[in-house]
Amino acid sequence: MSPAQLAVELRARRLKAGLTQAALARAIGSTQPGVARVETGGLVPSLSFVDRWATATGYPLMITLGEVQKALTPRQKGRLVRDILGDDAFDPWERLKDKRARGMNVEPERRYLMATTPPQRKAKTAVSRGLDRVGQSTATENMRDQHFASLLAIAVANWERLDWSYIDNRIAEIAELSPALGKSMRTMHRRGRRIARNALAKRRAKLL
């Protein structure tokens, strides 16, 4: 079990138990900031901490160590994204049609999609696509932007396998060259991670 997966599993159990972070912290002898850091993946808890967490929530947790994570198939990723974000939450071509119908200028966006989606183009990794969408989302810092929705889809479908530290480091490098752009990218990246993490935890809580 990866740290990212553990964070989602623990948060799901707290949500299922109906406990706030502060209430859970009191029950397990911790602090609200400590619970928050665990849920965001910023702190990998000890086994005794996890045991207290599972006991307090009433939902046991089985942890498997040394397991090789299997990548989801494209069909499985699509099903997961649709389950969490909705059937048409991130289709850029559908959004293009809507914008055209409203009389908006869609030519720049159409050229971008034509340049980035041809079948013969070598597929980017989830990390590079995610970083691209972070950058593109900063143009408007709009959480309803097609690129932000696509960022969410990438985060949800690749949560356990994405190298979040790599993305953080690339954003830090950008911030050194352009502080304003780096700040915007960091904001959108954090929003994307938070929304994806919460959505995954809520979905997992329903399955407990």
Image (cartoon, helix red, strand yellow):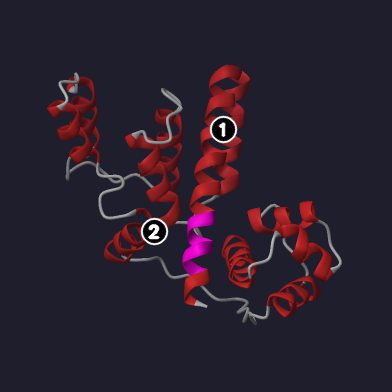
Image-based side of 205 in relation to 117, left or right: right
Kindly indicate the quadrant of the structure image that contains residue 93: top left
* Whole-percent x, y for residue 165 in the image: 60, 45
Tag 1 secondary structure: helix
Q: Which residues are magenta?
A: 198-204
The amino acid type, in three-letter code, at marker 2 is Ile
Quarter of the rendering occupied by the N terminus? bottom right
The residue where tag 2 is placed is 84
Q: Which residue is at a point 41% across and 22% down the rendered structure image?
A: 139
Q: Residue visible at 73% across and 80% down?
A: 55
Of mark 1 and mark 2, the one earlier in the sequence is 2
Q: Which mark is residue 187?
A: 1
- List x then y, in percent, for residue 153: 38, 50
Of the residues shown, which amino acid type is indicated by label 1? Thr
- Regarding residue 177, the answer to whether it shows in the image is yes
**Most foreground residue, 96 or 24:** 24
Answer with left or right where residue 9 lies relative to residue 150: right
- Vertically, is 97 above or below 120? above
